[in-house]
Image (tube, coloured by chain):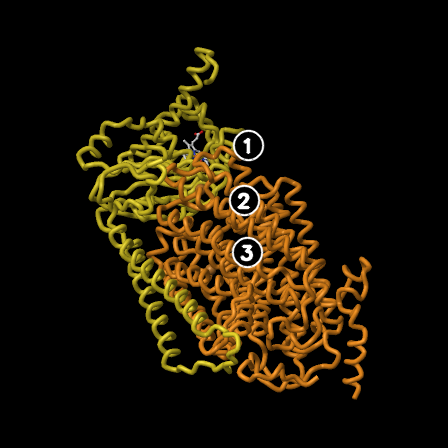
Amino acid sequence: MSNFLNFPIIPVGASTFAEKVDPLFYLLTLMSTVLTVGIFMGIVIMAAVFRKKPGVDRPSQALHAPILELTWTIIPTIVGLGLFVWGAVLFDDYIKVPEGALQIDVIAKQWMWKVQHENGMREVNDLHIPVGRPVKLTMMSQDVLHNYAVPAMRVKQDVIPGRYTSLWFEPTKTGAFPMFCSEYCGTEHSLMGGTVYVMEPQAYNEWLAGGPKVSPQEAGRFLFEEKLGCVTCHTGVSGARGPDLKEVFGHAVKLADGSSVTADEEYLRESIMEPAKRIVATFTPLMPNFANQLNDEDVANLIAYIKSLTEEEVVEVETGAPAP
Amino acid sequence: MAVVADRQIIHETEIRPRHYLNVNHSFWSWFFTTDHKRIAMLYLGTITVFFLMGGVFALLFRLELMTPEGDLFQADTYNRFFTLHGVLMIFFFLVPSIPATLGNFLLPIMVGCRDLAFPKVNLASYWIFVFAGMFGVGMLASGGVDTGWTFYAPLSTHYSNTSVFMAAMAAFFAGFASILTGVNFIVTVHKMRAPGLTWFRLPLFVWAQYATGIIMMLGTPVIAITLFLVALERVWGVGIFDPAHGGDPVLFQHMFWFYSHPAVYIMILPGFGVISEVIACFSRNKIFGYHFIAFSSLAIAVLGFFVWGHHMFIAGQSVYTGVVFSLITMLVAVPSAIKVFNWTATFYGGNVTLESPMLYAIGFMGLFTVGGLTGLFLAAMGMDVPLHDTYFVVAHFHYVMVGGMVMAFMAGLHFWWPKMTGRMYPEFIAKFNAVIVFLGFNATFFPQFILGWLGMPRRYHAYPEEWQVLNVMSTAGATILGFGFTLAIAYFIWSLFYGERAGNNPWGAKGLEWTIESPPTTHNFHHIPTVTEDPYNYTGREEVNVQQ
Ligand SMILES: [Cu+2]
Ligand SMILES: [Cu+2]
């Protein structure tokens, strides 16, 4: 019972935005309360004073008060304009990302959040960040609209398919803070949340270094399937726009000019960075050039992934074990 | 001389006077009538059914929200419930509510003519509405829809596997019904005013309907196009909104809100009109600032088209666009604030009585004030970031739509019910009910402001435990509110059969509608009246000064 009555009505604030937005919220709340109570009292008092009294036949008279009218026109206008300016200035903070912010990529899909840190560390739904340092999330959706919202940080941003959006904030307190998807996105919308863990910088660095590091194959798969969308052509089905990459590494590839080459790491690298140089037989050269989107590590990860496709096949054939 | 003779005949047949309700009882005479009063009653019956359906869905999902876990219904079921609640309440109740019922009934009488300019178009409007309703029912029968009433793409165009097409078509056709009503109102006000009834002698209710007509006519085609494009993309895969097909999901939101923000004014302006009439009548006073209220309705109708982007501050809209929308929104809020001051000032120097319509009107003023003020939170860009898409928004628009619009509708129904049906409802119960509805409403929606500030997102089937108490309060309030509306429907129906007969002017109100019989005859006036005085002329003590 004591627990029942003990429910929060004031949200935790854990970012520099909370310090800026909360005063405006409480000021507006105060203003609204005063005005609402004032108007209601006004109505009650007037209704009482000017109530129709039996027996008294008072001719009605209209109020003439130009000064009053002017006042109640000018004051709301000034208040409205003031609020507009205050709100716009606050919003300016929300969009101006400070230099040196920690860059984190977020990909949303029905119904999960995939987060990737600068060093390749990945997590799902949760987000680990250090306290006292601005963080910028660059986000994109793979299907419908979503919205990344952390109430304690007072941030929220729609996540849109086919377009990057971003948000930033600077946590001021350590702890675990809930995160929610705030744009309706279908069946499991209300379960599409997670936790933001704000840690001491030391602890964060340890987490970043010691946590379950993503293997190069995993990172490559992420690039291949999600970030760069290679799968859209290399679907692995015959008749697709790009060749099936399963049986490529270590095998002979027939090229359009009739020659043939054994696919090694260098061949794979060249196929990714300069796809037009050597064309696979029977395919139209429509593969885009990815050279300026990829750093060396990405390419290495991609190659590791493509290699793993072949190895998997081999392993499966050898053991005959059913797929999990 | 003829006038006198006419009147005598009526007095002699007092026992069973012929009026629009009892001229003919056949099915055909009701469902294919061109009498604006009968059409108003048909609309009233139809939208009440939709209101009850929408209300039941609301109660069902409020039941689910009693517990933090999503345990009562499946997530998909829950999502359908809130979507159906929204679609039915917005497109099938709130938009037609006052214009199609009270507006239809009263506008011709208030401008002193025998029917709307295009009676057959009016009938067509009703039947289109019914046709749209059939799509609605078909949509329900085929499993409902789960996209939210906002139909955001690409969820609606691609990912949802419910009856989006049927739902979009239902709203699409309902829109045409409202366009026809709007056009009819505009022409009637321009062309059919009685002699002597100048623009500034029109009751404010008429001004409000006129302004609403403009929005209906200009705004509704845009939502029709938008929904049509959704159908096109969904059924034939034409890429308009889904980026996977080369479309843009933000474009959908622009098109959607270009109508749906003005639609907020389609819903609230007629309410303003009702409140002006009721407050003037029960204060027995001239409305304060008549010209201001009349013109601000028009100004709101026009400016209301330039604020839609305040729904999209963090939806991927450009920041500069957002700034402009925020500014205009703040400016549009000012006239609404002044209106509340004007109504309050109307009490001054009057002879105030608190009959049930007045209690609802006072409830309206309080709740609408809260709704408007919390709108300022959301219009200030920086403040909108934490509040957007939370229960704060849900509470805000229910304060405007239910606390404002539905309260005004209740005020209007109680005010004109004697005129429409010739019967009085039990006044004491009605007063009691006004209090019940007011309290139930606040219990339902006030906790939602707090939930929103705590960060609870909208459209959540399950939620963290610490928000349970506030949600339980809200559900309890919804039950009281549901009881209140049911009670009102019950005593209105009761009054049809057992209510005391109302005289022509039970409230001692001014206005042409109070000079004719209750219920009116099919042709409203025996002779077209000539108007010689300003509206709300309560200052003198003589009875209504209208020459027949
Ligand atoms: Cu979601
Ligand atoms: Cu709006």
Question: Which quadrant does the C terminus of chain A fall into?
Answer: top left
Task: From the image, tell me which residue sits under label 2.
Answer: B59
Q: Residues within 10 Å of mark 2 (few under 14, many from 20)?
A: many
Q: Amino acid at mark 3?
A: Asn
CB of mark 2 near ligand 1 (< 8 Å): no
Q: Position of residue A164 (x, y in %)?
A: 38, 47
Residue A239, numbered circle: 1
Colour of chain A in the rendered structure image: yellow
Quarter assignment of residue B530: bottom right
Is residue B401 at least partly visible in the picture?
yes
Q: Position of residue B337 (x, y in %)?
A: 42, 69
* Residue drawn at the location 72% of the way across and 58% of the way down: B497
Task: Give the chain ID for the orange colour.
Answer: B
Q: Is residue A184 left or right of residue A113?
A: right
Outermost residue to the bottom: B1
Tell me the element at label 2.
helix
